[in-house]
Image (spheres, rainbow, N blue to C red):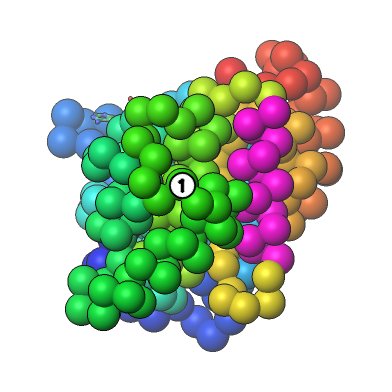
């Protein structure tokens, strides 16, 4: 899902800035309680936190689907959400038609077709433009969701537990793909990836812990994984 809303510009070099964001759902549940986050530029940045700590609310707010009750949000460029379950965001019958939906309709038809093929190439789905989406594996569907985000020219990907429903091979493929995409010098791409799998933290450029609607400081993913796996109540592999 791509979001067009353009709030204030983030400071130079940052993909995103949040300052003291508060958000409570209409029913009254406070999800974000003074959330501050500075997302450095290109790279793979991960947030980890227990269920209910506010991670999904945060991504929806960054994407513009929710509006904070107070605080400031500044973003550079366009962002796109990738959900845990690709069936919740893939709408059209074929891979190519899904990607065309994400591409600027003002562009010439040949350019739009070229962009479809280029996006499929980037995620390892070369030549599958005509393939029905229902015939794809879970991992392929998730890579198609990422291709749609890329086709929309998003410079910030917001990934909400994108590997939670995938088998181990597909989990590794999606993680490797995002890692590779965020390491390319051009176009600069930042990914904010939510996970509850501690092993995934070992592959990011920086990780932070989300607790009770607030985000801790960035630290090396290996350090945070080590702290959390030593912590009482953690299974060692995942944060419940
Ligand atoms: N659609 C919703 N309506 C009302 N409350 C919600 C909704 N989604 C989440 N919440 C509440 O917001 C808080 C944070 O939830 P969420 O952002 O989903 O956390 P996480 O993704 O870390 O599990 C929880 O108290 C949750 O019950
Ligand atoms: Mg969630």
Residue 135, visible in the rendered structure: yes
- Mark 1 residue crowding within 10 angstroms, few (<14) / some (14–19) / many (20+): some
Identity of the residue drawn at 51% across and 44% down: 143
Q: Quadrant of ligand 1?
A: top left
Q: In the picture shown, does residue 209 fall above or below 168?
A: below
Residue at the farthest bottom position: 12
Identity of the residue drawn at 35% across and 67% down: 113
The question of residue 182 being in magenta is answered with: yes
Identity of the residue drawn at 33% across and 71% down: 112
Residue 141, by quadrant, is top left
Identity of the residue drawn at 45% across and 31% down: 136
Residue 20, visible in the rendered structure: no
Q: Is residue 227 left or right of residue 177?
A: right
The question of residue 125 being in magenta is answered with: no
Q: Position of residue 83 (x, y in %)?
A: 41, 39
Residue corresponding to mark 1: 128
Considering depth in this image, is 142 or 109 the residue closer to the camera?
109
Residue at the farthest left position: 26
Q: Is residue 180 left or right of residue 74?
A: right
Q: Is mark 1 within 8 Å of ligand 2?
A: no
Q: In the picture shown, does residue 68 fall above or below 234?
A: below
Label 1 SS:
loop
Magenta residue span: 169-183
């Amino acid at each position: 899902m791509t979001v067009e809303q353009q709030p204030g510009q983030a400071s130079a070099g940052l993909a995103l800035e949040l300052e003291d964001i508060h958000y409570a759902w209409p029913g009254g549940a406070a999800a974000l309680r003074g959330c501050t986050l500075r997302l450095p530029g290109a790279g793979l940045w991960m947030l980890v936190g227990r269920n209910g700590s506010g991670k999904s609310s945060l991504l929806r707010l960054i994407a513009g689907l929710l509006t904070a009750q107070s605080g400031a949000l500044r973003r550079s460029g366009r962002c796109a959400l990738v959900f845990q379950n690709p069936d919740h965001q893939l709408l059209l019958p074929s891979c190519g038609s899904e990607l065309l939906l994400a591409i600027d309709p003002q562009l010439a038809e040949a350019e739009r077709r070229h962009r479809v093929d280029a996006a499929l190439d980037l995620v390892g789905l070369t030549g599958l433009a005509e393939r029905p989406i229902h015939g794809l594996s879970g991992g392929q569907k998730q890579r198609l969701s990422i291709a749609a985000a890329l086709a929309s020219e998003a410079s910030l990907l917001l990934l909400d537990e994108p590997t939670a429903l995938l088998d181990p091979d597909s989990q590794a493929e999606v993680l490797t793909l995002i890692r590779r995409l965020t390491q390319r010098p051009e176009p600069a791409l930042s990914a904010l990836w939510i996970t509850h799998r501690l092993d995934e933290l070992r592959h990011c450029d920086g990780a932070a812990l989300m607790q009770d609607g607030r985000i801790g400081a960035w630290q090396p993913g290996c350090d945070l994984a080590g702290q959390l796996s030593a912590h009482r109540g953690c299974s060692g592999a995942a944060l419940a």
